[in-house]
Image (cartoon, rainbow, N blue to C red):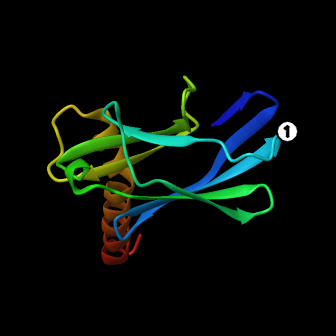
Amino acid sequence: MNIKGDGMRAELIESRISAGRWTGLVQMAGSGSATPDFAVTCDGRVLSGLVVAPASPGVLRLELPLPADVVTDGLQVFLLGLAGAGAPLGRFVLFAGQSADGDMMAEIAMLPAELDLLKAAFRRHCRATGA
């Protein structure tokens, strides 16, 4: 996803969560040397503690410690955007605890693990039957 405006373009090029911290890299292009004001929201609440620093020419590194109160059962969607902009620049998802019945995003997130289990079972079956 990217945002264009005021002669500036921003694109989230990498996103990861590790040790309770979200880190993202944003590619910046266009006019203006000022660092834009970014905001991360969850359930409509702007989260505090976002740190923005240059990573390389034209790339900003964003880091956010995830508050304990947003790490709860279910699916939490975090939106990254420019402060005051309507469209999000990107999003990241945190899933924890029991899967809510009918939660499509949770089901989609579980598919890779289930596919790995099926592949392993199919390989065992082929070895056992000589197929």
Seen at 25% across and 34% down, the residue is 103
Seen at 30% across and 43% down, the residue is 76
Label 1, on which residue?
Answer: 31
* Crowding at mark 1 (Cα within 10 Å: few <14, some 14-19, many 20+): few
* Front position in the image: 68 or 124: 68
Q: Is residue 107 above or below residue 83?
A: below
In the picture provided, is 8 more to the left or to the right than 63? Answer: right
Coordinates of residue 99 in the picture (x, y in percent): 18, 45
Judged from the image, the secondary structure of the residue bearing numbered disc 1 is loop
In the picture provided, is 23 more to the left or to the right than 18? Answer: right
* Front position in the image: 124 or 23: 23
Seen at 30% across and 76% down, the residue is 128
Seen at 41% across and 69% down, the residue is 131
**Residue located farthest toward the top when viewing the structure as drawn:** 86
Coordinates of residue 123 in the picture (x, y in percent): 38, 70
* Front position in the image: 4 or 125: 4
In the picture provided, is 26 more to the left or to the right than 47? Answer: right
In the picture provided, is 66 more to the left or to the right than 8? Answer: left
**Residue 5: which quarter of the image?**
top right
Coordinates of residue 107 in the picture (x, y in percent): 29, 42
**Residue located farthest toward the front when viewing the structure as drawn:** 34
Quadrant, the N terminus: top right
**Residue 129: which quarter of the image?**
bottom left
Q: Give the residue type that dot 1 points to.
A: Ser
Q: Is residue 38 above or below residue 87?
A: below
Coordinates of residue 25 in the picture (x, y in percent): 62, 56
* Front position in the image: 13 or 105: 13
